[in-house]
Amino acid sequence: MDKPIDGGSGNTKVSSNLDFLVPSVTMSISQEAQRRKAAGEDVVNLSAGEPDFGTPRAASDAAIKSIQQGKTHYPPNAGILELRAAAAQNLSLLSGGRAVNADRIVISSGAKQSLFNACFSLFGRGDSVLIPSPAWVSYPQMVHFAGATPIEVQGDIEWSLKVGVDQLSAAADSTTKGLILCSPVNPTGAVYTRTELQKIAEWAHENDVWLIADEIYRCIHYGEGPAPSVLDLPDELLEKVVLIYGASKAYAMTGWRIGIAMAPQPVTKAMSALQSHTTSGASQPAQWAAATALSDRKVEAEMKKMVEEFGKRRDLVVEFFRTRLQGVEFVEPMGAFYLFFRVDQFFATESDTALTFCEELMFEEALALVPGDAFGDGKWVRLSFAASEKDIKKGLERLERYIASLR
């Protein structure tokens, strides 16, 4: 596990604002795998958290057209109206036609910035924010940036590592001001049902807690239709909810850096004002691309085919674990494109963690996976099946060979 950034000394010492900061493990592992591949090593990279598909042609063409039309200047801080309207319509259609107001939507430079804006606008010194664990690496860092304290709430191993109201109640106290809930979950691929979401939203409402619902993987779901959403819940439960969405995962647009946040208008105004002093509005050509991605029927069809392909890869990985890696516990993914499996039975010493496992796996078999240390649980490892079937099969065979050597 990476250590907090060295603050330096003398004239080079950085601000104490960064005392808690830990570099993103997921990004560093993926970059190291890419570096080794570029150097000629036969590395299989199953660490990446992004689709291996290209951006839909219609979205790319929309960006090119916007450039040719001179739409390359500062956009509104909250985003161009065309994208906010497309996002509102898209979210409405995903939840059975529920009314969604474009005025409650803010566009940012990636869903990561949308999350940061929400945390920075809602939380501050003396506040605590609950984060179900294992969790995406950046949630605790963002809460720290806001001056608040992240409180990790361990998920139930008998419940696909998800949390319920009992765990949240046990972790909450008078300082609890927020809850960040991701579904489908990165890193486990677990999905909260509508009933589970409603119980959690009711708990947050009753306890006056802001709920930040990260639904960036919502359309990558292996059940019927999109994954359940907070937008499927009654209006009264959404009074203190911020929904995070975007085109990056389901539409293979990670590099376009477009994030979408839907929140009550006082919060969207605060978030827009905040980013007016940081990044300003997101890239205008990228916004036009995202507007097309979220509204074009042909793009929607491409997205569904991509999700079908992820489903086939998911089935391949799950079947491999069930038949060739029997005895290795894993969370069956119902969304996203990750499989989370347990490795502490292979630790040789008490100091070993999933990081040790992954480092030795890279050294012995040139296979890049992400240790659960990055997500708050050093007993597990994340495997991404956002890769070609060829690479997945090769990676699984290398993993099987390595585990056999440990057994």
Image (cartoon, grey):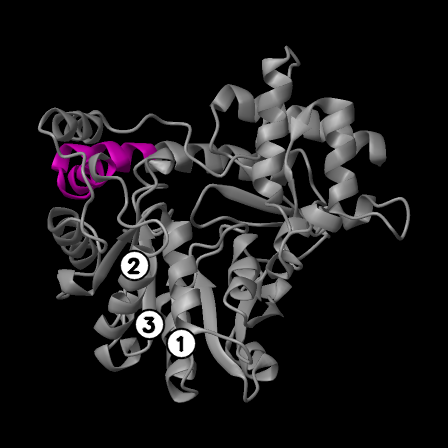
Tag of residue 261 = 2
The 10 Å Cα crowd at callout 1, few under 14, some 14 to 19, many 20 or more, is: many
- Work out whether residue 87 can be spotted: yes
In primary-sequence order, the first of circles 3 and 1 is 1
As drawn, 322 above or below 44:
below
Give the residue pinned by disc 1. Answer: 210
Position in image of residue 212 (x %, y %)? 40, 67
Does residue 81 appear left or right of residue 260 in this picture?
left
Residue linked to disc 3: 241
Query: Does dot 1 land on a helix, a strand or a loop?
Result: strand
Q: Residue flagged by tag 1: what amino acid is it? A: Trp
* CA distance separating discs 2 and 3: 10 Å
Q: Is residue 43 above or below residue 245?
A: above
Contact (Cβ within 8 Å) of mark 2 with mark 3: no
- Which stretch did the figure color magenta? 286-306
Closer to the camera, 313 or 62?
Answer: 62
Label 3: state its secondary structure: strand
Is 213 included in the stretch rendered in magenta?
A: no
- The tally of labels here is 3
